[in-house]
Amino acid sequence: MEFTRALVLTCSLLLLCCSSAYAQKVGAPSLSPSPAPAPTPPYVNLTDLLTVAGPFHTFLNYLIQTKLIETVQNQANNTDEGLTLFVPKDSAFSSLKTPSLSNLTNDQLKSLVLFHALSHYYTLADFKNLSQLSPIPSMAGGAYTLNFTDNMGTVHISTGWTNTKISSSVHSTDPVAVYQVDKVLLPEAIFGTDIPPTAAPAPAPDISPVADVPSASGGSGSTPTSKDGSSSYRIGSFSVWSSLVLAISVVLVSFL
């Protein structure tokens, strides 16, 4: 009786230990490694970029003068959308005669600068879809919109006053794209819709046709004059001979 009781107690202890160990083995969840955080986009200093990337000093000076450099810098590096910037060359500003930017108010100048920016990062390939969605609002907002046309990979930009194209990619790495344009983008919201006509090309010089030279066989021109001169010469020769014959005849008659 004592042996049976001890055997039952031993088996119960063994069963309890096995159940506890199995529960710990099954119940312990497997911990999968957490995904690595996404890399932070590289910081782009627009002042440094525009200073060394090309002849963009005039546009950079406007950004600094209007204190919009902080606005576009914040859009480039502190938002999820990024920034697309169209930067005219210095020669585009120097060649701009009409209209003049010197008469713009400070608010108009700010709108003009923001008219060159989109509040989203766009690659060159994205403009093919944008051409179907035009007009696209710029960072100036309101009526300050841009029209894009993709012509076999060449991106054309139209504002009403300005027709130009993207001539080169200065920087295009998410989240910042900077593209060079050959003309200043002039908005109708500032300069109106009374756009002066484009100067017509110079006409070709008017060259008068050369007069036909008459043939030697006859026709109009100088030939009849020559013919008349020959006739006059023959008539004069005939009169001289007639006078000479008449004089000889008179002499002969006087001797007879």
Image (cartoon, rainbow, N blue to C red):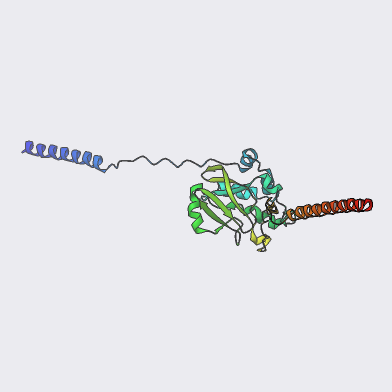
Please indicate, yes or no, whether residue 202 appears anywhere in the rendered image.
no
Choose between 13 and 182: the one closer to the eye. Answer: 182
Vertically, is 18 above or below 64? above
Check the image and name the residue furthest to the left: 1
Please indicate, yes or no, whether residue 94 appears anywhere in the rendered image.
yes
Residue 41: % across, % down? 51, 42
Q: Choose top left, top right, bottom left or bottom right for residue 89.
A: top right
Q: Choose top left, top right, bottom left or bottom right for residue 98.
A: bottom right
Choose between 215 and 186: the one closer to the eye. Answer: 215
Residue 150: % across, % down? 51, 52
Check the image and name the residue furthest to the right: 254
Identify the residue at image location x=63%, y=38%.
Answer: 52
Identify the residue at image location x=42%, y=40%.
Answer: 36
Q: Choose top left, top right, bottom left or bottom right for residue 54.
A: top right
Choose between 63 and 149: the one closer to the eye. Answer: 149
The mark total stands at 0
Choose between 60 and 87: the one closer to the eye. Answer: 87
Image quadrant in which the N terminus is located: top left
Identify the residue at image location x=13%, y=37%.
Answer: 10
Vertically, is 48 above or below 194? above
In the drawing, does residue 149 fall left or right of residue 7?
A: right
Identify the residue at image location x=61%, y=40%.
Answer: 49
Residue 37: % across, % down? 44, 42
Residue 87: % across, % down? 62, 47
